[in-house]
Amino acid sequence: MAPASIFDQILDYTNRANPYPLYAELRRTPVSRADDGSYVVSTYAEIVALLHDPRVSSDLRNRADYAEAGDEEGASGLPPRFIALDPPEHDRVRRLLTRHFGPPHDPDRIVGMRPDLVEIVSGLIDDFAGRNRIDLVDDFAYPFPVTVICRLLGVPREDEPRFHVWADAVIEAIDPTTGDFATRTRRREQAFAELGRYLGELADTRRDQPGDDMLSELVTDDGPEGRLSREELMTNAALLLIAGHETTVNLITNGMLTLLRHPDVLQRLRRQPDLAIRVVEELLRYEPPVQFLSNRVALADIDIAGTTIPRGAPITLVLAAGSRDPDHVPNPDRFDPDRQYNEHLGFGGGIHYCFGAPLARPEAQIALTELARRLENPRLVVDPPPYRPNPSLRGPRHLPVTFDNIAPAPAARGRDHRTVERQLHHA
């Protein structure tokens, strides 16, 4: 039996805790061929070039083997999400969604949420009182972004057990280790269809009784480009609900794990809340929540780094390897929030740059700052912790942490939440 390829070793769960030495080996061949026929790109310059190359599609219907998976729209009854579309349809749908989410169309929405973010974080940490051990994932990193995205979209928080099942099914279906492309596509579309129906029914109730949430605004939008169709709203609301919390869970958990492994930085953050901005940017480079993208397709033969990627071939962009490319950044395996140059691929790039980045940044900044400030003498229980199965959405499934005590919330010290807001404001 032939030895497993480097990328197959990366997919192997036994390497989940530390894939970075394998990424270094992968970069020796900037473009390699995986056992499933996909082309794996691992160096920074080549990844950036392909993220901006119009010959690279995000519409999986352009894959040469797509017919085996069946018609995506027919399988779910819904059109593809905007991240699975190319211009001009991608641009139209993204503009309609952005009008009600953030900059440049609605620059005040995310800024206006900052008091809510601080309130939610403070409440979750208050609940640690009387304990000296928590699971940072289940007790904090998961409920925080779930509560935030529910408020933003207008989804009842008490429905979390219901949509959690569909979200888990989607995450499992995008894991390349859980079956062939056709099988995973069908499972993914079925889960999106069920979640989309739930959100479509929820949106229908907002047509006559709108609130101040995104679902209400999307179903009553009278902008110059019109509204999303009901089916477009269903599929994209499902995407936002899942993407709006799954990756942020990893960002916060990977972040706290990294800080506990670097207690000097943790202590600095405790004393200097404004360090959070640089800490989060370095985390997006050093321990990104999304390790690679497997949803790209060549629309034509593409010559890159001495390899020709043929038309119709699937492409995997290993963002985590690119962000640690020593040809791009010095001392890439060192966690250094003070580094002067920190262009990273933590949110991807090009026209599909992470839609939720304006929200994920302040969520992580506020969460990590308050954990650093209020957990007294925090310590890891086990290192490495157990990881989630998915090699792409990589993060600990559990992160047991012990501590001596919980410091008072800002208000209890005579400060209000606006103090933390001002310290963490990131234009």
Image (cartoon, grey):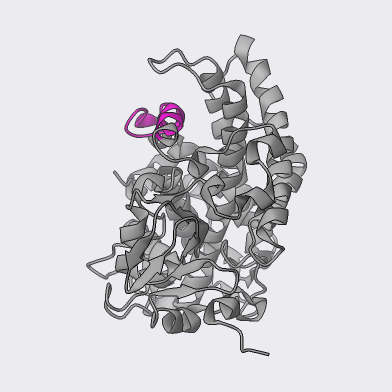
Using residue 402 as the reference point, say whether residue 370 is left or right of it: left
Residue at 69% x, 35% y: name it: 74
Residue 98 counted in the magenta span: yes
In the image, residue 393 sits, relative to residue 92, either above or below, namely below
User: Quick check: can you spot residue 17?
Assistant: no
For the magenta stretch, what is the residue range? 91-108
Asked where in the image residue 387 lies, by quadrant, the reply is bottom right
Asked where in the image residue 320 lies, by quadrant, the reply is bottom left
Question: Which image quarter holds the N terminus?
Answer: bottom right
In the image, residue 80 sits, relative to residue 400, either above or below, namely above
- In the rendering, at what x and y percent does residue 267 appear? 41, 71
Residue at 33% x, 44% y: name it: 422
Name the residue nearer the viewer: 212 or 423. Answer: 212
Q: Residue furthest top?
A: 208
Question: Which image quarter holds the C terminus?
Answer: top left
User: Quick check: can you spot residue 349?
Assistant: yes
- In the rendering, at what x and y percent does residue 256 appear? 52, 66
In the image, residue 275 sits, relative to residue 101, either above or below, namely below
- In the rendering, at what x and y percent does residue 41 appear? 42, 69
- In the rendering, at what x and y percent does residue 69 appear? 68, 50
Name the residue nearer the viewer: 368 or 24. Answer: 24
Residue 193 counted in the magenta span: no
Residue at 39% x, 37% y: name it: 87
